[in-house]
Image (cartoon, grey):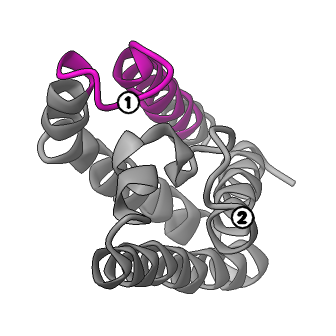
Amino acid sequence: MNLPQIVIGTFILLELSNVISLYFNPETKRGNSIGVFKAWEKSKNDPEMHYFVKYLVNWVAGTKLIFIFLLVVILLTANQVTLNLTLIALILSISTFFWRLYPLIRKMDNNNEIEPKNYSATLFLMILVIIIVMLTALSISLLIG
């Protein structure tokens, strides 16, 4: 296994743990699940809203599964060029967190709608580290050939 394969494989495991949390224990505050949002508990007071929120949580989990399975196929069959392009695609798509999701979660954090406090900063750092690891693996892969 080369460096891009190791990084992509690790990302697959990370995302798979999130999918398992979303499907089987969405209330947890671990694994980047939905339990950090106070709105999850509030939605239980309105069954119509709670079913809608549960639908969206399961939709996210299902969508993540699509990408996980595609990444597994790439991991098992791709040549080096495709692995490098996969890292670029992952870096670009994960980076959209900073454009759309981070402003929202930071606002919710500032409004005391997330537990634990400052979770948005933790998530920011975690996503940044993932991107840096992918950029590093891509750079090394391109330098080595």
Residue 128 in magenta?
Answer: yes
Residue at the right extreme of this rendering: 1
Image height check: is 28 above or below 122? below
What element does badge 1 sit on?
loop
User: Disc 2 marks which amino acid?
Assistant: Leu
86 horizontally vs 7: left or right: left
Q: Main secondary structure of the magenta part?
A: helix
Lower position in the chain sequence, tag 2 or tag 1:
2
- Residue 14 location (% of width, % of height): 70, 50
- Amino acid type at image mark 1: Ile
Residue located at (41% from left, 25% from top): 128
Considering the image in quadrants, where does the C terminus appear? Answer: top right
- Identify the secondary structure beneath mark 2: helix
In the image, 2: left or right of 4?
right
Residue 76 coordinates in the image, percent (x, y) = 78, 79
Q: Which residue is mark 2?
A: 16
Residue 64 or 69: which is nearer the viewer? 64
Q: Which residues are magenta?
A: 109-138
Q: Is residue 57 above or below residue 141?
A: below
- Residue displayed at 34% across by 49% down: 39
* Labels 2 and 1 touching (C-beta < 8 A): no
- Label ID, residue 85: none
Q: Residue at x 65, y 84 (%)?
A: 69
Q: Is residue 57 magenta?
A: no
Query: Which residue occupies the foreground of this view, 136 or 38?
Result: 38
Give me the C-alpha separation between circle 2 and circle 1.
23 Å
In depth, the one of 61 and 11 nearer the eye is: 61
Q: Is residue 56 left or right of residue 133?
A: left
Instruction: Write down the residue under mark 1.
Output: 114
